[in-house]
Amino acid sequence: MSLFPVKDTSGLSASQVGFVLPALGVIRSMDAHSARIRTRRGLADSAFKDRMSQIYVPTKSIEDWKPLLAQPDRHWQPGFSAMTLARAWEASPAGRFPTEVEAILKSSGRAGWDNLKLLAAIPEYKVPLRGGSRASQTDLLALARGPDGLIVVAVEGKVDEPLGPTYGQRSGEAQTEPSERLDFLIKKLELSQCPDDVRYQLLHRTASALIVAEDFAAESAVMLIHSFSPTHKWLDDFKKFGNAMGQQVDKGQLVSLGKRSGTPLYIGWCVGDQRFRTDPAAGIT
């Protein structure tokens, strides 16, 4: 089960309202905390157009993920990352990560990370970024409880879809990506400089994990590529990103990048279970 955003509770079932309303005060408190964080980051709500509801209800099936996509009819296809990721996570027992995600979290070596409790998983979670009005849309945001507190896991699902343009390409496109945003990402990740061949998507997805960790006062942030590519496509680009961040990375390993912007940060490439890509019945509830 995951959670998806709603605009109001008028169309919810009794069980869904029972889930949402007791948490409303907590969510509003988190939203107020987030507003304070956004103010410090220079992200005025009036200037940020790409927002989503802060109220979430449980999904009933993987089909609840489809409307949240930027282009549902194009991206919601068998064998593509959106549907494959939904199948893998919906198939997991309550309070548990997919088996391969549990394994990579355990590989961090952190005490207690071999038995983290999954508290919530939110598909297509939007994170505002300084510079421009378009948010970074995380494929899946997971919140987990560990022995030292809350952990934010920003998940990017992949099969063979590209990782998009590089930092160098974005730097040359001032009209579509203001330099203010690029500068913000570099500062957030505490990079002295960024190689031109590093994928821009990896930069803003990782920065988003740090931002959400701040919003939720989490003790650690994780950026995880959950790849279902049978050939591990784009793994070399992930390794380039790891090198730019000062660490060697590889599939199946969660690597510490130390503290970035005051929050312990980890990145990893998780190898997904292929049956969720190839079996039409896998993860269907």
Image (spheres, grey):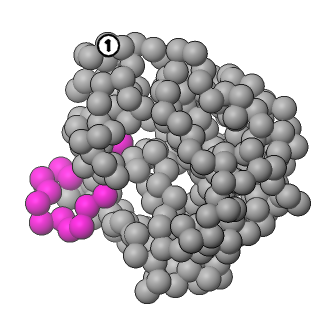
Q: Is residue 14 magenta?
A: yes
Q: In terms of image quadrants, where is residue 80?
A: top left
Q: Quadrant of the N terminus?
A: top left
User: Residue 194 vs residue 268: left or right?
Assistant: right
Q: Residue at x 53, y 36 (%)?
A: 162
Residue 4 sits above or below residue 238 on the image: below
| Magenta-highlighted residues | 1-16
Question: Residue 280: image x %, image y %?
Answer: 26, 17
- Closer-to-camera residue (120/37): 37
**Residue 60 visible here:** yes
User: Residue 281 vs residue 254: left or right?
Assistant: left
Q: Which residue is mark 1?
A: 279
Question: Residue 187: image x %, image y %?
Answer: 78, 66
Give amino acid for label 1: Asp
User: Residue 21 vs residue 44: left or right?
Assistant: left
Question: Residue 149: image x %, image y %?
Answer: 65, 51
Q: In terms of image quadrants, where is residue 82?
A: top left
Classify mark 1: helix, strand or loop. loop
